Image (spheres, rainbow, N blue to C red):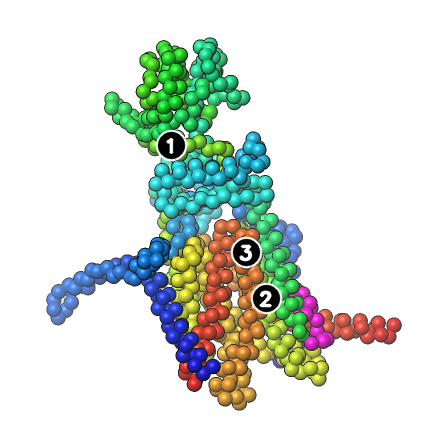
Amino acid sequence: MDIVGKRNFYFLVSLILILPGIISLLLFGLKLSIDFTGGTRIEYRITDKTKPTNLDIEQLIKQEEIEVGSVQSSGKNSFIIRTKPLNPDQTKKIQETLDKKYQDVKQLSTETIGPTIGEETALNAFKSIALASILIVIYIAWSFRKVPKPASSWRFGVCAVGALLHDVLVVVGIFSILGKLYHVEVDSLFVTAILTVIGFSVHDTIVVFDRIRENLIRAGTSTSFERITNDSILQTLGRSLNTSLTVILTLFTMLLFGGETIRWFVVALLIGIASGTYSSIFNAAPLLVVWEEWSRKRALKNKKG
Amino acid sequence: MRKMPRFLFWFIVILTILAILIDLPRRIPISFKTPQLPIINKEISFERTLYGFDPNIVLKNIGIRRDFSFKKGLDLEGGTSVTLKAEMKDVPADQRDNALQSAKTVIEKRVNFFGVSEPVIQTARVNDDYRIIVELPGVTNVDEAVNLIGKTAQLSFWENGASGSAKLASGSALPLGITSIFPDPVKTNLTGKDLKESNIVFDPNNSQPQVQLIFTDEGSKKFGDITRRNLQKVVAIVLDNEIIQAPQVNQVISTGDAVITGSFTTEQAKAVSIQLNAGALPVSLTTLEQRTIGATLGQESLLKSLFAGILGFVIIVIFMCVLYGRLGIIASIALFLYSLFVLALFKLVPVTLTLAGIAGFILSIGMAVDANILIFERMKEELRRDRKKDIAIELGFARAWTSIRDSNISSIITSLILIYFGTGIVRGFAITLLIGVLVSMFSAITVTRTFLRMIYR
């Protein structure tokens, strides 16, 4: 199998995967949860014979002159109400109104987050993703410092982060589309998912890179870099697929049985880890080859000129 | 080198026994009832409680006592978490840390009076914001909680200025509606600091709840003076700029004992009394964030994620056994030990388990398997090159090591960043992931290698 040779095809696949997400991201952005924007989120379970709909509840609360952001059903008889930040009196009012109208109203959870905290969470999320990426580049560059010429250890770090950004873009893009189509929100758990995906993506990439390093040292300059890279990818293919399969299987059980609260968290992980496996095989190492060729051509040109 | 596997083997065995002892729940109730059995024509019922080993029995002798149970986060147990911001505008910069600490102490006292089990109260400084984070497991009545924690509880007594004599200059903020009682309201020198204790008592006539005030000696003197000055006049009792009661003084009270009648519900009277007992907050607090999770939701989430975890574990075991046969069985044993170790560490550290934390744990099982897969794939490769089995095993470990090291270190970097920057859920997740990665390096490498060496010696 010649993966590196057909690299442009695989890059194209990535582009097709990422592009719709980026377009959606530019047009609609992400649907941010109150974790980032600030606001109140109350979840009720209403087991009433009349089976109230989202609209019923929304209208009921609006009568109390409380501005409702959205009412959404979540699982059996459960409703999530989102509003701007409410004070305790207002939440009490909602409870009383619902109690009056329906039987057996149970407040499952409430959350009120002030705008300051929201901004802070968003900033911290961004900071941690940026910092993680930088530190990973530095670590890989250091860890691969003994890699023989023509490869440079910084290239390994940068390509690993390139693959990482690919995975982050895939997940964020798909969630932008999901947010537009199904009102899926991005919350602080989502940030956790992104960071895990980053961890996994780099984990996967390093395994392939490690093999390239080993083969480079063994082969010396007798074999072309392209050939060594392709061999390394093939040699680690079994491991890459098996590992991803175990993780994906566990995630599937969590998706099916883990409950509502972590559903989208698991979906984000599933997409990210599948993408991470793809990028570590088809993007990260081929990128190294592209870079190597490019710098060789440039060196040649310089010599001629 | 030859002796090493045996030594390591026993080391692993001892660790495993320790982990099991820590992991076992303290009480295991067992009870079942069979239906009518055909031959003996009887129902058999069985009811007993097994007691697990309590590490405190041993630790007691060296003077340590610890609670070895899982700490469950609010999302699993139900409860309320409130983040408050302290208004430090009027506090000099060098006293702010002190003010925050004493506010924390007051909140701790209030919460303890209220009888919440295992509350967590932390202070935090974010840029120029001074914050207090309060977690109350089991408390799901938010209003009650926020009122209890956030009220400054400044008690003051007010009188009309016309009566002259010694008074403090009235502050800038007058209690709401006080001007309708007094034309010239003046704050007296009697405050919450003069209070010895406060109780909730019931009016013997109509069993209305009341708040009893018992003053210190000095407070009694001040109170006596106030009642003397204002005989047959009105004195207002104010809590946090709100007039609670404005009774007429009918006699001079010098015993240092007073009762606020107000029109309290029992809960309100209790809350006021707690606030007065715990003292006034040195700064006023505003709520930045508040989360409440009902106990039902927490319990459901816990059961669901536990089930998913066990199922995930079983699937991995089957997968590994199918892929790698005998090696897979050994990896599964290592994985089982891994779970035991991690759970024991969760209890020892202790790590507060949250939903995200459990997700992190399940995920780390996946990472633990990865190390084994890396090693086994490498072994297969070496075997294909016609190496002898024991050499292939050693080579498999040696060659897989650099990948395992580098990839795990990058995971450790990510989890450390998350622990540093993250709050709440994100942090819980990162801590479990970090523990998971560290333990997995031990279980997947040392444990598996020791077992393999024992077998293929």
Asked if both marks, 2 and 1, belong to the same chain, the answer given is no
Q: Residue at x 44, y 31 (%)?
A: B280
Residue B14 x, y percent position in the rendering? 37, 70
Q: Secondary structure at mark 2?
A: helix
The chain containing the residue under callout 3 comes to B
The residue indicated by pointer 1 is B277
User: In the rendering, at what x and y percent does residue A148 appear?
Assistant: 69, 76
Q: Is residue B278 above or below residue B215?
A: below
Of the image marks 1 and 3, the number of the one nearer the N terminus: 1
Q: In front of the other: label 3 or label 2?
A: 3
Residue B131 visible within the image: yes
Front one among B195 and B319: B195
Q: Would you name the residue on which mark 2 appears?
A: A202
Residue B229 placed where, x, y %?
Answer: 40, 12
Does residue B354 appear left or right of residue A300 in this picture?
Answer: left
Give the magenta-colored segment's residue range.
Answer: A148-159
